[in-house]
Image (tube, helix red, strand yellow):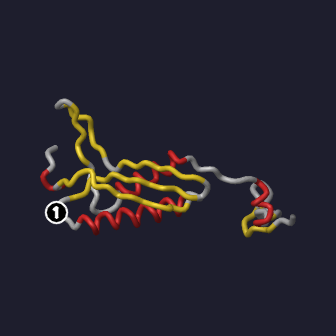
Amino acid sequence: MSTVPLTERAPGNPGTVAAVTPLPDDDEASERGRLDVALSVVRKIAEYAADHTPGTVRTQRRLAGLDLGEAGASAKVSGYGEQVDVRLEVPLAYPARITDSAAAVRDQVRERVQALTPYRVRSLDVSVSALTDPTSRRD
């Protein structure tokens, strides 16, 4: 492997040129190993993508009158090999077209999972867990 000179001078010695070693060819990269992404990571990516899609909202979680904070999308991911199946439960803003909001969630989640992981989304089911008017929230 040869070195590639940079335009900057090496520190401490103004007469020399700093050099870097180029990255190995793609052939060598395939021999180094592979990246495994756990399905729990895919679940988190799907939930995050769904929560950040326009038309989704966060809802208040309450149990026996106690405020437990907010909840957003919830995902379950299963799969084998290079394909995953994703089931999402999302709270949506109301009033809005539910079909449009669900389609936007489906597109966003599929795009983010496939861009950030080595998996392809085989199926993606979206269930609406709540319809909430975001303007009527109490703080």
Q: Is residue 37 left or right of residue 63?
A: right
Q: Quadrant of residue 101?
A: bottom left
Q: Residue at 40% x, 57% y: name it.
A: 49
Check the picture and name the quadrant holding the N terminus. bottom right
Q: Is residue 117 left or right of residue 59?
A: right
Q: Is residue 5 left or right of residue 100?
A: right
Instruction: From the viewer's side, name the closer residue of 130 and 55.
Output: 130
Numbered disc total: 1
Q: Is residue 98 left or right of residue 19?
A: left
Q: Quadrant of residue 18?
A: bottom right
SS type, badge 1: loop
Is residue 82 shown to the viewer in this render? yes
Is residue 83 positioned above or below 36 on the image? below
Location of residue 86 in the rendering, given as x and y in whole percent from the top left corner: 44, 55
Q: Residue at 77% x, 54% y: name it.
A: 32
> How would you rate the neighbour count of disc 1 (Cα within 10 Å): few for under 14, some for 14-19, many for 20 or more?
few
Amino acid type, label 1: Pro
> Outermost residue, right direction?
1
Location of residue 93 in the rendering, given as x and y in whole percent from the top left corner: 22, 58
Location of residue 117 in the rendering, given as x and y in whole percent from the top left corner: 56, 57
Q: Residue at 50% x, 62% y: name it.
A: 122
Q: Quadrant of residue 96?
A: bottom left
Instruction: From the viewer's side, name the closer residue of 10 and 74.
Output: 74
Is residue 18 shown to the viewer in this render? no
**Residue highlighted by disc 1:** 95
Instruction: From the viewer's side, name the closer residue of 4 and 102.
Output: 102
Q: Residue at 34% x, 50% y: name it.
A: 73
Check the picture and name the quadrant holding the C terminus. top left
Location of residue 99 in the rendering, given as x and y in whole percent from the top left corner: 27, 67
Is residue 38 positioned above or below 21 on the image? above
